[in-house]
Each structure stands twice: as structure tokens, then as C-alpha cells.
């Protein structure tokens, strides 16, 4: 059987996207425990989506301040929203700390994900970026910080920095954004299975596993 592609549109600054990634990992683990389908034929690619594309590149501010000042949301409402998503994240095995989360422009982070894809480390890089942002309160908008994070997973720091400063993968980010628009994606995470089936939102592992398993079963019948 040929590889089954799962294309995931997400933003590193999106709390639901980290949950979605973890749920996808869990879904593939569920399939691995099943005798009906083989999850080893699945390939996952992460694609760029910018929730706040107009954020100035130099921005480094508390996430709560950004939502209050830029989005006009009451502080109490933001805190309630953070509390809710923090609990959902905890249920998925993740620890969020919005007290230290920093708002940033994530375009360069997406360029880094494309760099990591080129060397076969995209999933690891995505995991590191999400954890840096939501758990550790690291700034993920600057080239120096991103190069440091890349080095932490074993990538060549100098090569990463060179690529980010040159904008080597800027066109790849733009292509992802164009494809998201063509698909009509207006929120993330958004999963496209086999280029045909779309699943919106951080669905539970069981839902994702069922969708993936169904497509794999359909392929096996053809």
C-alpha cells in the first residue's frame, strides 16, 4: 500500500494545535494497537497557518496582554479561556503555563518547520516549538531563539540561522497559506487525510483514529 498522507495546518501559537498534534500521535498509537490497519504507512506533514499575521516581527509580550489590547477581550474572559484550554491540554498529557507565554510573530517558526522537514525532523521540531511556547514561556519569534531551539534537537544551528536570515523557506510558508485559503480553512488545527477528507479542530484521538482507519480500509479494498 502506498503512503497515506496526513497534512496538518496549524500555528505554533495556537493552543488547540498542540493538543491536536498530541491527539494525532495518540490516534496513530491506537491504530498501531489494532490488527485491522497499519499506521506505518501514514506520513504526517505540518503546514503553515498564521493566526496573527500582522503581529510585528519584534513583538515579545505576554499572551494575555496581546489578547486584551489587540483583540479587545476582557481580561477575565481571557483568563477563563486560558483555564479551559489548560485543562483540555492536561487531559491530553500537556502542561500549559499561560502566565509565562509570550506572544510572537510565528512566520520564522514556520520557516524553521520547513527547514526541519527538509532534513527529516519536522515532527520533532514542531514538538520542541510547541513546548517552548506553551510550557516554557520561550520567545519563538526571533531567529536567534529559533536557532537555539533547532540546535536542541540536533540540527545545525549555523545552517538554520543562515536559512532563516535568508528567508530560504519563506515561499514554502506562503504556499501553505495559499493552499489553506484554497481549501477554505478558517481555523486550526485542520487535518487533510489522503488529500480528500478534512477534519477540523482538535478532535479526540478516537475520532482521528476512526477517520484515518476508514481511509486506510477504503484504500485496502481498491
Image (tube, rainbow, N blue to C red):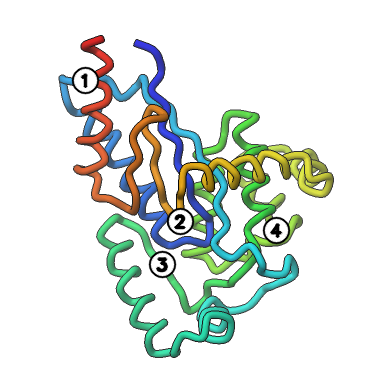
- Residue 145 tag number: 4
Q: Are marks 4 and 2 in contact (CB under 8 Å)?
A: no
CA–CA distance between discs 4 and 3?
20 Å
CA–CA distance between discs 3 and 1?
36 Å
Q: Earlier in the sequence, mark 3 or mark 1?
A: 3
Q: Quadrant of the C terminus?
A: top left
Eye-nearest disc, 3 or 1 = 1
For label 2, count other residues whose C-alpha is less than 10 Å away and answer few (under 14), some (14-19) or many (20+).
few
Eye-nearest disc, 4 or 1 = 1
| Residue identifier under label 3 | 96
Q: Earlier in the sequence, mark 3 or mark 2?
A: 3
User: Residue placed at 65% from the left, 44% from the top?
Assistant: 173
Depth order, front residue of 219/85: 219
| Residue identifier under label 2 | 186
Q: Quadrant of the N terminus?
A: top left
Residue 150 x/y as whole percent: 65, 46
User: Residue placed at 53% from the left, 48% from the top?
Assistant: 181
User: Residue placed at 27% from the left, 31% from the top?
Assistant: 212
Amino acid at each position: 500500500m502506498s503512503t497515506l498522507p496526513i497534512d496538518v495546518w496549524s500555528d505554533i501559537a495556537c493552543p488547540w494545535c498542540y493538543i491536536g498534534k498530541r491527539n494525532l500521535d495518540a490516534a496513530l498509537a491506537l491504530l498501531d494497537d489494532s490488527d485491522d490497519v497499519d499506521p506505518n504507512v501514514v506520513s504526517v506533514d505540518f503546514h503553515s497557518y498564521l493566526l496573527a499575521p500582522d503581529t510585528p516581527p519584534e513583538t515579545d509580550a505576554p499572551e494575555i496582554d496581546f489578547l486584551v489590547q489587540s483583540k479587545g477581550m476582557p481580561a477575565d474572559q481571557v483568563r477563563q479561556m486560558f483555564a479551559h484550554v489548560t485543562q483540555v491540554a492536561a487531559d491530553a498529557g500537556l502542561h500549559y503555563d499561560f502566565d509565562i507565554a509570550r506572544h510572537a510573530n510565528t512566520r520564522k517558526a514556520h520557516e524553521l518547520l520547513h527547514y526541519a522537514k527538509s532534513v527529516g525532523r519536522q515532527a520533532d521540531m514542531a514538538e520542541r516549538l510547541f513546548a517552548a511556547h506553551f510550557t516554557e514561556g520561550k520567545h519563538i519569534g526571533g531567529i536567534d531563539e529559533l536557532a537555539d531551539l533547532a540546535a536542541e534537537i540536533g540540527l545545525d544551528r549555523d545552517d538554520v540561522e543562515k536559512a532563516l536570515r535568508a528567508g530560504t523557506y519563506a515561499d514554502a510558508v506562503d504556499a501553505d497559506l495559499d493552499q489553506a485559503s484554497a481549501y477554505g480553512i478558517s481555523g486550526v488545527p485542520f487535518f487533510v487525510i489522503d488529500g480528500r477528507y478534512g477534519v477540523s479542530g482538535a478532535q479526540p484521538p478516537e475520532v482521528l483514529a476512526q477517520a484515518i482507519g476508514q481511509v486506510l480500509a477504503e484504500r485496502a479494498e481498491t
